[in-house]
Every structure is written in C-alpha cells, then in structure tokens.
Amino acid sequence: MARDEKVKERWLLLVEKLSAQFADGEQLDLDSIIYLVGLQELNQLNRTFKKDEKINLMHIAICRLLEPYGYYEFDFFDDEGWPHYKIKEELPSLKAGEQSVLMKEALVNYFLENNFIS
C-alpha cells in the first residue's frame, strides 16, 4: 500500500475512534482533533478554558505535532505548566490543502506514537 493511502486509512480510523470517544459519534474535524492534542499536551483536563487559552491550546498542539518535522523545538514549561516552543525553521508556504495534508499526517504520527491507533 502506498504511503499516502496508508496515512489516509489511518486518518479515517483516527477520526472514527476519536469521534466515538469524544463526540458521541459525530465526526470531529481537523481543528477539533488539534484541540484535543493541545489538551493532552497541557495535561490540565479538569478545568475550563477562556477563548484565548483555547487558541493557545491549538498553538501548543501545532508546535508539538510539527516538532518531529524540525519546525519547532520544545523550550520550557512556564510557571502555570504551559509548554513553550521555539521556532527552529520557518514553515514553508503551503496551500490550504497542503497544510491539511501535513497536519493530518502529523496527527496520525502523533497518535501512532501514543499507541492510540496502529
């Protein structure tokens, strides 16, 4: 099976599993799954977040997801436990569809590493 086909297959499995677990079967979109990664990485699950904090959660997730690609590097945790990353390499200019493909691949790899999917 081609690499792209395998990523697509795993992406569909990931969406199905996460949707069943967190959205009563209603299909989660890409942004929702990125948000879940941010929650996972912050590990402060028993609280509510303000709008700006939700945006920061998505930023944390994107940094963590793109870290293996060499774009970001973990720097430190602040006093409130929020992870901070520094930019190692600027992201290339990508079209919207290309950005989506990159994030889906990064999410699949993240959940493979965490043994949520195989």
Image: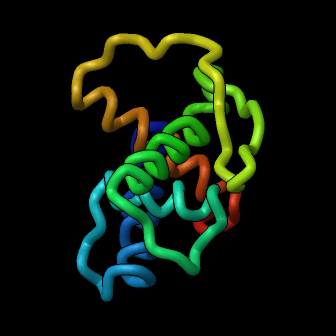
Q: Quadrant of residue 70?
A: top right
Specify whether 15 is left or right of 109: left
Which residue is more in the foreground, 60 or 93?
A: 60
By what rule are the colours in the image chosen?
rainbow
Residue most toward the bottom? Answer: 24
How far from the left and from the top, in percent, is residue 17?
A: 45, 75
The quarter of the picture where the C terminus appears is bottom right
How far from the left and from the top, in percent, is residue 42?
A: 63, 58
Residue sitting at 41 percent across and 80 percent down?
22
Specify whether 104 is left or right of 90: left
Which residue is more in the foreground, 43 or 15?
A: 43
How far from the left and from the top, in percent, is residue 14?
A: 45, 64
Residue sitting at 48 percent across and 44 percent down?
1
**Whether residue 6 is situated above or below residue 33 in the rendered picture:** above
One can see residue 45 in this view: yes
Specify whether 99 is left or right of 112: left
One can see residue 6 in this view: no
Which residue is more in the foreground, 70 or 88?
A: 88
**Whether residue 62 is situated above or below residue 16 in the rendered picture:** above
